[in-house]
Amino acid sequence: MTLDDLRVFVAVCRAGSLSAVARDLSCTQSAVSQHVKRLERETGVSLLERQPRGVVPTAAGRILRDAAAEGIGGLDLALRRLGDLVNGESGSVRIATGGTTVRHFMAEAIVSFRRRFPKVSLEFQTETSSRSCFDALLASHLDLAWITIGGPVRGIEQRPVVSLSWVLAVRSDDPLATRVRIDVSDLMDIRLVRLPPNSTSGAHLDAVFAGMGVRAGSDTSVADWDTALLLAELGLGHAVVPAVPRPPKPGDGGPLRLIPIPALPPLSVGWAVRRWDALSPLARTFADAVADSCAKTPSLCAGEATLMPGKDQ
């Protein structure tokens, strides 16, 4: 059993496909299969189960996957920190994010960080959901992931940074555009653009609606918050979205109106890491820079984003 065997096995579990991992590693599917077979011979158990659309780990495979991912993650982090000690301020910080994260939450922090550490490489890996961000953290040598805060995840530490209120996005010529707030009862008869069903924010909103008895219809679903805003701006639907931070723009003109929905509980977003106490100084500095930037950046609706205190704040 080698470290490469374990790395390949964790990658296969995450991708659900031997061929996908083979493409990523620029090798043959047979070579990937040999890594898994070697592990199965040494453990004496079957680790993968074939399904019509790929493979999934067996019960034994899940045990080995979790242990291997945690061990590999710790080893990679230690090697990164050793590299930072050798290279000083010329290392790298690797971040997993969603599709709209960088623009809304990190733009100012990236500029200030690069000015302070011009030799440090910032590397971003786009993921489609908080769950995939967690998987990426556990399966690779990423430092940080920007996520929607949810329930506990084994091997992951989550730290809230910002609490986002919810707004209803409508065109300026919509009958609701003159409202100063939206009540939950107003949503009953509105067909909403649906947030990504596999996302934590979409699941959060669905659960809140179910608890409040809201049965809003849905005309379409989108991949991210920005697309929901665009459809609302084009008059193609109403969208309930988080009031994400953004740089201020002159004037309040434009075709889009964002109306607060005070009754909806806010959505927490922030950082996820494997271990905060093992985070490299550069990664910690970048995480703090993003938190500081969010604290002073206006939201889509003025005053709707609230900084959440963390252990280092």
Image (cartoon, grey):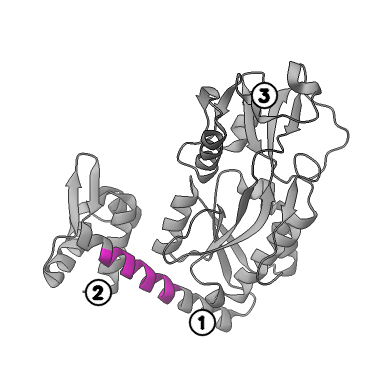
Looking at the picture, does residue 29 appear above or below residue 240? below
Magenta stretch secondary structure, dominant: helix
| Label 3 secondary element | helix
The quarter of the picture where the N terminus appears is bottom left
User: Magenta span covers which residues?
Assistant: 63-76
Given residues 187 and 253, the one toward you in this image is 187
Residue in the image at 68% along x and 38% along y: 263
In the image, which disc is placed on residue 2?
2
Relative to 193, 14 lies left or right: left
Q: Earlier in the sequence, mark 1 or mark 2?
A: 2
Secondary structure at badge 2 equals loop
Question: Could you tell me residue 277's position as x and y percent?
Answer: 55, 77
User: Quarter of the image holding residue 191?
Assistant: top right
Q: Which of marks 1 and 3 is nearer the N terminus?
A: 1
Asked if residue 290 is among those painted magenta in the image, a careful observer would answer no
Return the disc, 3 or 2, that comes first in the chain's sequence: 2
Closest to the observer: 112 or 14?
Answer: 14
**Can residue 8 be spotted in the picture?**
no
Q: For residue 233, what is the image quadrant?
A: top right
Q: Which residue is drawn at 60% across and 32% down?
A: 227
Horizontally, is 276 left or right of 134 in the view? right
Q: Residue 186 carries which label?
A: 3
What residue is shown at x 65% (from left), y 71% (from top)? Answer: 311
In the image, residue 221 sits, relative to residue 85, either above or below, namely: above
Residue drawn where x is 46% and y is 78% of the image: 79
The percent coordinates of residue 275 (x first, y second) are: 51, 72
Q: Residue 104 carries which label?
A: none
Tell me which amino acid carries mark 3: Asp
Q: Label 1, on which residue?
A: 82
